[in-house]
């Protein structure tokens, strides 16, 4: 074979092998190439920044707070008035609860809760000078600690003006108090009593309000005066709500 034919055959073989060599070749990753630095995409960094919330985003600015919503400007005057008003409402609520008990016909010693007895020149609660028990589910039995207070206890029961309640002496230390079954008239009388006590409670609440205003000596149209007025309105509304529930439970008109 001539030399030219050998060269031609070898050249043809190289041409046939070259496409396979090209297909198997892949560019090396930049990170693997020495001396080449890679950088994070700016777009990704911006996306990450958008997801991160600034620490100050959840902070509440004091400029956005409504005056009086976080702090009572009237201070100690406000809180003392609130305590006094709350005590008035609590006392009225207890009185109404006793009346509702009587309206349902259930006999309990609490029915004589309004009774006050003059002893030693002072008015005291009935339980301070006597015990009260229930007999046969229809009668209260009052037993005084000392015989000389029997007359004062009897007078105190009369003066309490409890509807249908008439005390009866048994001996030198005992008084029976039969409790009549509540009639429609009796329930209406209880509601009338609750109305009278409600007005007394409102008067006391307004007096506490006026006392706080006077003691605080606040400027006209000040936020402090608004706070005290709102406080007064709140507790007067509580009294109205208690009376409304009493009316519903007794069926009064």
Image: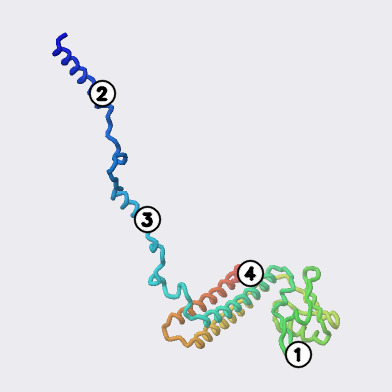
Front residue of 137/203: it is 203
Instruction: Using the image as rendered, state which of residue 83 and residue 145 is in the foreground.
Output: 83
Q: Could you tell me residue 20's position as x and y percent? A: 26, 23
Considering the image in quadrants, where does the N terminus appear?
A: top left
Q: Secondary structure at mark 1?
A: loop
Residue 121 in the image: state x and y as whole percent: 73, 91
Check contact, mark 2 vs mark 3: CB within 8 A. Answer: no
Q: Looking at the image, tell me whether mark 4 or mark 2 is earlier in sequence order.
A: 2
Q: Residue furthest front?
A: 3
Q: Distance from label 4 to label 1 (Cα)?
A: 38 Å
Between circles 4 and 1, the one closer to the viewer is 1
Name the image quarter holding residue 15: top left
Mark 2 and mark 3: Cα distance apart in space: 50 Å
Which of marks 3 and 1 precedes in the sequence?
3
Q: Which residue is mark 4?
A: 250
| Residue sitting nearer the eye, 27 or 212 | 27
Residue 41, compared with residue 7, is above or below; it is: below
Instruction: Indicate which disc residue 59 carries.
Output: none
Give the residue number, with chain letter if any, for mark 1: 120
| Label disc, if present, on residue 20 of the rendered structure | 2
**Occupied quadrant, residue 101:** bottom right
At x 55%, y 85%, the residue is: 207
Give yes or no for contact between labels 4 and 1 (Cβ–Cβ under 8 Å): no
Horizontal side of 251 relative to 76 (left or right) equals right
């Amino acid at each position: 074979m001539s030399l030219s034919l050998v060269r031609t055959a070898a050249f043809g073989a190289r041409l046939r092998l070259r496409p396979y060599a090209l297909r198997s070749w892949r560019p090396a990753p930049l990170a693997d190439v020495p001396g080449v630095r890679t950088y994070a995409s700016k777009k990704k960094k911006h996306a990450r920044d958008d997801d991160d919330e600034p620490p100050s985003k959840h902070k509440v600015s004091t400029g956005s707070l409504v005056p009086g919503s976080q702090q009572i400007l009237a201070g100690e005057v406000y809180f003392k008035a609130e305590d006094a008003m709350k005590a008035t409402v609590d006392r009225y609520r207890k009185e109404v609860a006793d009346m509702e008990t009587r309206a349902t016909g259930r006999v309990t010693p609490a029915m004589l809760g309004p009774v006050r007895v003059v002893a030693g020149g002072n008015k005291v609660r009935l339980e301070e000078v006597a015990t009260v028990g229930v007999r046969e589910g229809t009668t209260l039995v009052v037993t005084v600690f000392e015989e000389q207070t029997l007359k004062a206890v009897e007078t105190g029961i009369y003066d309490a003006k409890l509807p249908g309640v008439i005390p009866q002496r048994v001996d030198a230390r005992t008084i029976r108090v039969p409790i009549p079954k509540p009639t429609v008239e009796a329930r209406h009388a209880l509601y009338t009593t609750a109305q009278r006590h409600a007005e007394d409670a409102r008067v006391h609440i307004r007096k506490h309000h006026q006392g706080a205003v006077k003691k605080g000596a606040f400027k006209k149209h000040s936020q402090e005066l608004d706070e005290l007025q709102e406080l007064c309105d709140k507790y007067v509304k509580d009294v109205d709500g208690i009376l409304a529930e009493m009316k519903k439970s007794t069926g009064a008109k």
